Image (spheres, rainbow, N blue to C red):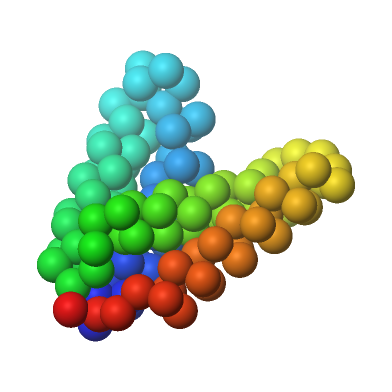
Amino acid sequence: MSWALLIAAGLVEVAWSQSIKPTVGFTRPLPTLVCFALAATAVYLLSLAMQGIPVGTAYAVFTGIGAIGAITLGIVVHQDPVTPGRVAALTLIIAGVALSHATTPES
């Protein structure tokens, strides 16, 4: 269950990362509210996941999922450039998240 919560937290973090730009420097009330709500939800889910996963592992996986999602959405939605370095970074992040999952016993 802890890993499911951690994955959910990471996915909410991806949504949160995409919700920052529409706030236009936190000058637009509704997008700002959505941004803050997503951030709070992501951290709440992360805190629940940390009850069964070590803090370091949970946070590394959480930020890894967020980075993977943000980079991927940047490429797919915002036409960010695809470079060998970005592909290598994504590959390493994915490998790190998978290795963390595979080597962390659930408490």
Q: Position of residue 15 (x, y in %)?
A: 44, 51
The one of 44 and 85 positioned closer to us in this rendering: 85
Residue at 59% across, 56% down: 93
Q: Is residue 6 above or below residue 89?
A: below
- Please state if 96 lies on the left or on the right of 13 as rendered: right
Q: Position of residue 14 (x, y in %)?
A: 46, 52
Residue at 42% across, 18% down: 25
Residue at 49% across, 54% down: 64
Q: Is residue 65 above or below residue 107?
A: above
Let me know if residue 12 appears in the view: no
Q: Position of residue 12 (x, y in %)?
A: 37, 57
Query: Quarter holding the N terminus?
Result: bottom left
Query: Quarter holding the C terminus?
Result: bottom left
- Counting every numbered tag in the picture gives 0
Residue at 29% across, 44% down: 39
- Please state if 26 lies on the left or on the right of 21 as rendered: left
